[in-house]
Amino acid sequence: MATNPELRVTDTIYALSSGAPPAGIGVIRISGPSAGKALESLGGRLPPPRRAHLTLLTDPKDHAPLDRALVLWLPGPGTATGEDVAELHCHGGRAVIAAIETVLSSLDGLRRAEPGEFTRRAFENGRMDLNEVEGLSDLLAAETQQQRRAALLMAEGHFSRRVAEWQTALLDLSAMAEAALDFSDEDDVPDEAIEMRISDGLLKLGEEVRAALNAPRAERLRDGVRVVLAGPPNAGKSTLLNALVGREAAIVSDIAGTTRDRIEVPASLGGTAFLFTDTAGLREQTADAIETIGMDRARAALEAADIILWLGDPDMLPRPDAHLIFAQCDRREGSPGMAVSAVTGEGMEQLAALLIDQAARLLPNAQDYALHDRQREAVSTLLAHIDAAARNADVLIIAEELRQARAAIDRLTGRASTEDMLDRLFSGFCIGK
């Protein structure tokens, strides 16, 4: 990603914004101050704004035909990037795309876009805030319907609109606090009960922000619900994992201690993304240094697990919410827990249903978005300042806490973010976004 802000503002960029050729249609997007001039160079004239127009595209050097395409002229600032934008909807063959891009690269002031640069311009021109950008990033990476729904809600600004409401409330409270400070010794105080109004407003706002922190974690939705299979050696963990993910992901052996390290396998059950983790067998003591490391990693996996399937002694459950699984029920006598056999299939449907049901409690429903760690940290900081203001009776301190709360809002929307963080975020996008 270019680090010179002037280059990003003054250059006109272009890129293929549709799928890789060959395809039925290829959409080449041009954004920046020279977008209109570039469209005139290829099409001979500018079509009416925001109306598709069938145009013969030619090379301005020798007027050789390139393709007959639908073109769109979208003058800024009411565009996706906030700049003048032109779109060429041409045939999606490799030769056609290459010929048009070669001509565009020869025009003065045009250059190929860098990864995420169109979206970055939308952010810098106020067309999107950082939360919507993160939602778009998640939407592009979505593999399940749950991921798609939550990402779409974030990308369409559902959370951003809530943040805007918080910001408006903070500005109103700040204005009241400043009025209380400026006119405390005067007779024209706007409202004698202004301090009570500030207190009530802080309590209400605090409740709303606190409720937002209950939103599910986007990392869990993106990476999958973490399911850890744990228990003593030879309890059937690897065999069960292979049956759950539908392939031979873990080595199965009768030799105790075969699994030495964590094996993580992503899989989808019922449209829900999971990350299954097979762990080293846990036992009291071992003289094997490698096995000891494996058991330490197994315990670390248990601490980070969303769901634990325990294939061991009922009295040794690692957590109260762990699910006791009686694995290998086809070759052992009855035992407490859910009876499961990865060999015969007994109990596997019930286990899958249990996992899907548990995951549903951890993931957003169809009307909810999910928050990234960055967002949760900013919201937590915002709440801390609101709570601090609510606990204080000194209007001067309240005003300062409200100022800090507004700064937290700016970090949440990206208006006070560091350049390095933005570079990392946008570099993860594809070229045409």
Image (cartoon, rainbow, N blue to C red):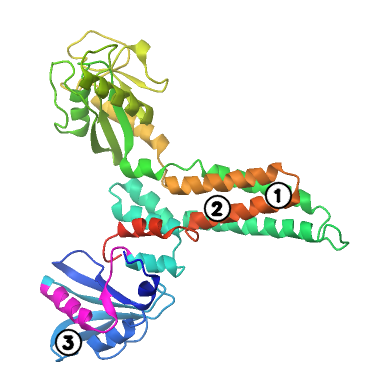
Q: Earlier in the sequence, mark 2 or mark 1?
A: 1
Secondary structure of the residue carrying tag 2 is: helix
| Mark carried by residue 59 | 3
- Front residue of 355/8: it is 8
Three-letter code for the amino acid on which mark 2 is drawn: Ala
Q: Is residue 403 visible?
A: yes
Q: Position of residue 239 (x, y in %)?
A: 18, 24
Check the picture and name the quadrant holding the C terminus.
Answer: bottom left
* Residue name at image x 42 percent, y 54 percent: 153
Which residue occupies the extreme right position in the image? 187
Cα–Cα span, label 3 and label 2:
51 Å
Looking at the rendering, which quadrant does residue 387 occupy?
top right
Check the picture and name the quadrant holding the N terminus.
Answer: bottom left
Q: Earlier in the sequence, mark 3 or mark 2?
A: 3
Looking at the rendering, which quadrant does residue 84 occupy?
bottom left
Quickly name the residue at label 2: 408
Cα–Cα span, label 1 and label 3:
66 Å
Please determine whether, in this image, residue 263 is positioned above or below residue 268. above
